[in-house]
């Protein structure tokens, strides 16, 4: 397959690989298709327009992001890659409502999230966040950690426990609901963090290097599981990673940022069929995509 890249403005493709018709599938017969995803693959999950970010520091201004335009389709999985310091985390923090952009707008669906430096808390409340550290409360059990966002929304105990138990099953933590975070492996803690982020059915899931601290084998497994979770939840995902192959494996499109200031250099559609197994990484198509993106990164040196 020839790698196609587009530059700058990134609009979801008119036909998404994420939009096949619903097909029932249990966890063991997962076929990678979406069961709940809204019908129109062109519907916008997240729209970023003209986003600029300058940090003011004692040593002067740091221009971290410049003129970022990006549309992420509803239910689409977009990976963000780029060299260290190119602004990936800054962009994710703007998208998650944690950091005000210096200029530009962010919309979720058609609802403004950041406009003129003001945030709409109600919009950001619908987003799920997962970071490199799981940040679970050590004194809560897994199920109570997962249920916490529901508790904060006033959902009753029985209902939130039922939902959290269901989510534990989705992320493969059945049997560990009553364990404490210290009793889990790093990968299991991250799965609990993902389950917690999914608790309120987020419209958008924002993930910043969620598997960065895991060993290679666990990371591979987590990628397969995240693919499954994404397919069954239908959530729009923006995923930051340093790993080009992880980005390609998971994404519908890979957005590559260049540094000083961070700009979108290219957007690469990943048309590999789903569901993707680890064997896909041995295919020529996968290799071409990874090499193409690496080359773009090398050209910056
Ligand atoms: N709080 C801050 N104050 C000042 N400058 C910052 C701040 N956070 C980030 N920066 C600067 O903004 C630029 C982008 O940083 P950012 O952390 O977003 O990059 P990144 O691509 O996520 O890096 P990495 O891959 O190493 O995590 C860098 O030059 C960084 O020094």
Image (cartoon, grey):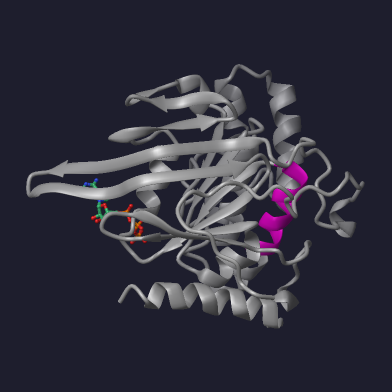
Quadrant where the N terminus sits is: bottom right
Tell whether position 226 is magenta: yes
What is the x, y in percent for residue 164?
70, 36
Q: Left or right? Give the position of 88 relative to 243.
A: left
Q: Note whether residue 142 is visible.
A: no
| Residue 233 falls in image quadrant | top right
User: How many numbered discs, if any?
Assistant: 0
What is the x, y in percent for residue 127?
55, 34
Residue 173 against residue 223 in the figure, above or below? above
Q: Residue at x 45, y 33 (%)?
A: 106
Which segment did they paint magenta? 222-234
Q: Residue at x 36, y 66 (%)?
A: 83
Quadrant where the C terminus sits is: bottom left
| Residue 37 falls in image quadrant | top right
Q: Residue at x 62, y 26 (%)?
A: 150
Q: Note whether residue 64 is visible.
A: yes
What is the x, y in percent for residue 231?
75, 49
| Residue 68 falls in image quadrant | top left
Q: Left or right? Give the position of 147 relative to 37.
A: left
Q: Would you say the magenta stretch is mainly helix, strand or loop?
A: helix
**Residue found farthest to the right:** 24
Residue 244 against residue 241 in the figure, above or below? below
Q: Residue at x 48, y 24 (%)?
A: 112
Tell whether position 268 is magenta: no
119 vs 7, nearest the viewer: 7
Residue 128 against residue 239 in the figure, above or below? above
């Amino acid at each position: 397959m020839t790698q196609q890249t587009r530059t700058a403005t990134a609009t979801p493709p008119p036909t998404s690989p994420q939009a096949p018709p619903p097909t029932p599938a249990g966890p063991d017969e997962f076929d990678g298709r979406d069961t709940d995803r809204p019908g129109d693959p062109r519907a916008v999950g997240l729209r970023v327009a003209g986003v600029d970010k300058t940090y003011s520091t004692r040593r002067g201004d740091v221009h971290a992001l410049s003129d970022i335009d990006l549309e992420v389709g509803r239910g689409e999985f977009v990976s963000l890659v780029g060299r260290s310091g190119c602004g990936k985390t800054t962009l994710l923090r703007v998208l998650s409502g944690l950091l005000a952009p210096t200029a530009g707008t962010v919309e979720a669906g058609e609802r403004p999230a950041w406009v003129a430096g003001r945030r709409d808390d109600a919009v950001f409340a619908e987003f799920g966040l997962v970071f490199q550290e799981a940040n679970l409360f050590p004194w809560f059990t897994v199920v109570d950690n997962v249920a916490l966002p529901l508790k904060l929304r006033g959902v009753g105990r029985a209902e939130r426990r039922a939902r959290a138990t269901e989510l534990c099953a989705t992320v493969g933590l059945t049997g560990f609901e009553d364990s404490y975070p210290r009793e889990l492996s790093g990968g299991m803690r991250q799965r609990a963090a993902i389950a917690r982020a999914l608790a309120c059915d987020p419209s958008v899931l924002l993930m910043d290097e969620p598997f960065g601290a895991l060993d290679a084998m666990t990371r591979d497994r987590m990628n397969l599981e995240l693919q499954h979770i994404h397919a069954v939840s239908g959530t729009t995902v923006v995923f930051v990673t340093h790993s080009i192959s992880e980005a390609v494996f998971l994404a519908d499109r890979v957005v590559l940022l260049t540094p000083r200031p961070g700009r979108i250099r290219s957007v690469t559609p990943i048309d590999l069929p789903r569901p993707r197994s680890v064997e896909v990484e041995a295919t020529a198509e996968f290799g071409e995509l990874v090499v193409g993106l690496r080359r773009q990164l090398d050209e910056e040196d």
